[in-house]
Image: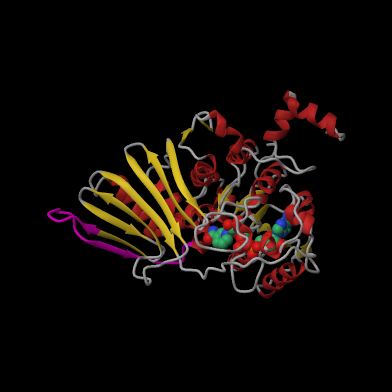
């Protein structure tokens, strides 16, 4: 095997290199073999993922990794309480280089998902990566390419796909029982004080944080507590800054848009139009607090809306989807799926509640696929699609125009908007499958 980087590149381009890629053959597990796992990014969701995985039979937590010492220590304690003996690692590259690790879970902020997924696939690891798959449209294609090229199982964190009542909802929509569905609306509402997440001054990073490695491929910025966004008892605020994420539509919206697309056989919209902005909050967040996006699928309009200043006294359901058909409406959220017939329709009312928590089921599905090499419930391809749909909503606002999506060419028809599909990586990070 060539050792210098140049020799290695030449080798990989040659036939012998191609053989080396396919030689990343999956490990064959016998019934008693444990899947050796590392958890990269152990904040709120990373801890939840770790807690669920640590309790599964057949898993050994080999390492936990975070660039923020308090979160790293908390994760190590979670794993130890469940009977594991993880290494504590601050730089994920040590994990990728460790050949004894079979699979990684990436629960970092969004801007790290593509790079660590792609490098993880190259290093022969299976990957559980949180949603959204990517921050920029073009990154999604590279992630999918890496998953397929290196023959990896890559499950995305869109866990609703493992929920029985979501699966039933998608089955009913696809079956035609609701008649012609021409409209599917999805939403999230909340009511926040005008001060929102506040407007703290730039300052020195807290002790124990490697701010440079936290930012990684993102543009280098002075430390601001809201950009890092880690506070007690809340999901972090990085999600409201363009350098790291895409705001509410790529954070919550993607979960709902993902189910709409699952029900439509993982169709992509051919056109997207959106409006929105910061109309209410006076804080240093950058992404829209209010937004409406319209997606044109074949024969159906999908819509996403969020607002941050009103919940209609909680009377309106706070996050959900309505599929509107000629024979009835199917409503689904995280608790229930319900069919309400139209007047005069022979459709029967129907309700199905959530049976079991889908998140652990999603993990069981991932671990099963690692062993069997089947495609997981949220195969990366599906999450790349719902991530791109959500991102295009933001880009339509930014470009001030309708965007026509060409799934085959993986680009938009409007050439002036194409630069918005890319994200520059800060040196030395480079995204390459
Ligand atoms: N599937 C779901 O339902 C769900 C729910 C919440 C969050 N999420 C996703 O989980 C991800 C994390 O969100 P969160 O709310 O837990 O954020 P968080 O800020 O609480 O956690 C992120 C952690 O990643 C660490 N980190 C940053 N760069 C790192 C690096 N290079 N190496 C190792 N660690 C690094 C941070 O220090 C932090 O501890 C996001 O992508 C979010 O969208 C998914």
Q: Position of residue 262 (x, y in %)?
A: 41, 47
Q: Position of residue 93 (x, y in %)?
A: 78, 51
Outermost residue on the bottom side: it is 81
Q: In the rendered structure, does residue 353 fall within the stretch colored magenta?
A: yes
Which picture quadrant has residue 270?
A: top left
Q: Residue at x 52, y 54 (%)?
A: 288
Where is ligand 1, by quadrant? bottom right
In the rendered view, would you say 64 is above or below 8? below
Residue nearer the viewer, 8 or 140: 140
Q: Quadrant of the C terminus?
A: top right
Residue 44 relative to residue 77: left or right: left
In the rendered view, would you say 417 is above or below 76? above
Q: Position of residue 302 (x, y in %)?
A: 37, 46
Residue 77 in sight here: yes
Residue 193 relative to residue 146: left or right: left
Q: Position of residue 219 (x, y in %)?
A: 73, 48
Residue nearer the viewer, 254 or 396: 396
Secondary structure mostly taken by the magenta-highlighted segment of the chain: loop
Residue 41 in sight here: no
Residue nearer the viewer, 414 or 116: 414
Which segment is the magenta one? Answer: 340-358
Q: Quadrant of the N terminus?
A: top right
In the rendered view, would you say 130 is above or below 122? below
Which picture quadrant has residue 14?
A: top right
Q: Residue at x 43, y 37 (%)?
A: 271
């Amino acid at each position: 095997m060539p050792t210098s980087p140049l020799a290695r590149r030449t080798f990989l381009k040659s036939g012998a290199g191609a053989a080396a890629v396919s030689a990343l053959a999956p490990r064959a597990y016998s019934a008693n073999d444990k899947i050796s796992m590392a958890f990269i990014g152990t904040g709120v969701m990373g801890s939840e993922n770790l807690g669920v995985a640590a309790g599964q039979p057949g898993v050994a937590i080999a390492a936990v990794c975070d660039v923020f010492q308090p979160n790293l220590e908390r994760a190590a304690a979670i794993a130890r309480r469940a009977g594991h003996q993880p290494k504590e690692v601050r730089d994920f590259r040590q994990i990728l280089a460790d050949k004894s690790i079979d699979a990684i879970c990436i629960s970092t902020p969004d801007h790290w998902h593509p790079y660590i997924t792609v490098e993880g696939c190259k290093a022969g690891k299976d990957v559980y990566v949180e949603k959204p798959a990517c921050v920029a449209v073009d990154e999604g294609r590279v992630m999918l390419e890496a998953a397929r090229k290196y023959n990896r199982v890559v499950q995305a964190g869109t866990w609703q796909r493992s929920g029985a009542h979501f699966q039933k909802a998608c089955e009913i929509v696809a079956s035609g029982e609701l008649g012609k569905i021409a409209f599917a609306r999805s939403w999230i509402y909340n009511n926040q004080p005008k001060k929102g997440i506040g407007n703290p001054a730039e300052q020195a990073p807290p002790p124990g944080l490697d701010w440079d490695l936290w930012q990684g491929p993102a543009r280098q910025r002075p430390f601001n507590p809201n950009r890092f966004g880690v506070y007690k008892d809340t999901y972090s605020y990085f999600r409201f800054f363009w350098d790291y994420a895409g705001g509410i539509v790529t954070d919550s919206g993607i979960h709902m848009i993902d189910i709409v697309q699952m029900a439509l056989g993982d169709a992509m919209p051919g056109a997207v139009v959106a409006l929105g902005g910061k109309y209410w909050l006076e804080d240093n967040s950058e992404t829209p607090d209010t937004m409406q996006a319209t997606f044109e699928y074949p024969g159906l309009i999908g819509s996403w809306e969020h607002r941050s200043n009103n919940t209609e006294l909680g009377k309106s359901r706070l996050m959900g989807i309505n599929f509107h058909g000629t024979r009835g409406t199917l409503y689904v959220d995280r608790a229930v799926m319900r069919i309400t017939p139209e007047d005069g329709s022979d459709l029967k009312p129907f309700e199905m509640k959530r049976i079991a928590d889908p998140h652990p089921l999603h993990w069981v599905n991932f671990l099963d696929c690692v062993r069997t090499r089947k495609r997981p419930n949220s195969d990366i391809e599906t999450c790349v699609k719902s991530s791109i749909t959500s991102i295009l909503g933001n880009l339509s606002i930014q470009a001030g125009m309708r965007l026509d999506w060409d799934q085959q060419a993986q680009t938009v028809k409007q050439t002036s908007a194409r630069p918005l599909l890319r994200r520059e990586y800060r040196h030395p990070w480079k995204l390459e499958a």
